[in-house]
Image (cartoon, helix red, strand yellow):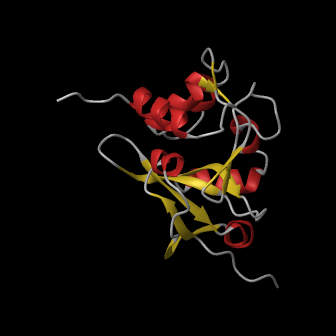
Amino acid sequence: MNQRTVDEDIDTAIAALVGESRFVLAQPATWLDSFEHGLPFRLPPSYRSLLVRYRFPAIERKGVTLFGNLDGSAPTDFVVASIRDPVLSSVTRRSGFLQIGRPASGSYDPICFDLRSRSKTGEAAVVRLDHEEILTADSIRIIATVADSFLELLESGEPPNKPLKLSVGRRRPPAA
């Protein structure tokens, strides 16, 4: 039996994105190792494979605008956009989430990897978080599971969002 590699899975997913010629094979991103070293967790293998081997602008997939990976300095690049809001970034990361995009609707809700629970291969679900809960209550509320993995997000059409009600973190006391 021929076992596919993560790189082959990503290459297949990219090749299947008809009309998405914006993905260009490239040398590894110079910023990736230092960025990942500063995280409390490793990136899912499929997402890391994409970032290491491809350059691409922000793209829309399944109602999600995924951050791009051009040169590490564009405002919509993952390395820039995922930390632009320090409160959002701090709360999500310490809770085990990493932002990779936003809803294509323009909502401020972060689309994140849920890195608290991973598959045997190291992959993580992609979820939508409530930005107001993060910014006002310093806690996490998952609104929906967008995809069970990053590859699923790339490979399939519009998913039925799977609503969840889960809160993690602490609530701030009401303002006096």
> Is residue 2 found left or right of 5 in the rendered image?
left
* Picture coordinates of residue 56, whole percent (x, y): 69, 31
Q: Nearest the camera: 170 or 28?
A: 28
Q: Is residue 42 visible?
A: no
Residue under the point 51% across and 70% down: 160
Residue 39 lies, with reference to residue 134, above or below; the image says above
Quarter-of-image position of residue 35: top right
Q: Residue furthest front?
A: 18
Residue 8 lies, with reference to residue 164, above or below; the image says above
* Picture coordinates of residue 58, whole percent (x, y): 73, 41
Q: Nearest the camera: 73 or 5?
A: 5
Residue under the point 46% across and 39% down: 44
* Picture coordinates of residue 89, whole percent (x, y): 69, 51
* Picture coordinates of residue 36, whole percent (x, y): 57, 31
Query: Which image quarter is the C terminus in?
Result: bottom right
Residue under the point 71% across and 56% down: 88
Q: Nearest the camera: 127 or 87?
A: 127
Q: Nearest the camera: 153 or 98?
A: 153
Q: Residue furthest left?
A: 1
> Is residue 173 found left or right of 10 in the rendered image?
right
Residue 131 lies, with reference to residue 29, above or below; the image says below
Q: Residue furthest top?
A: 27
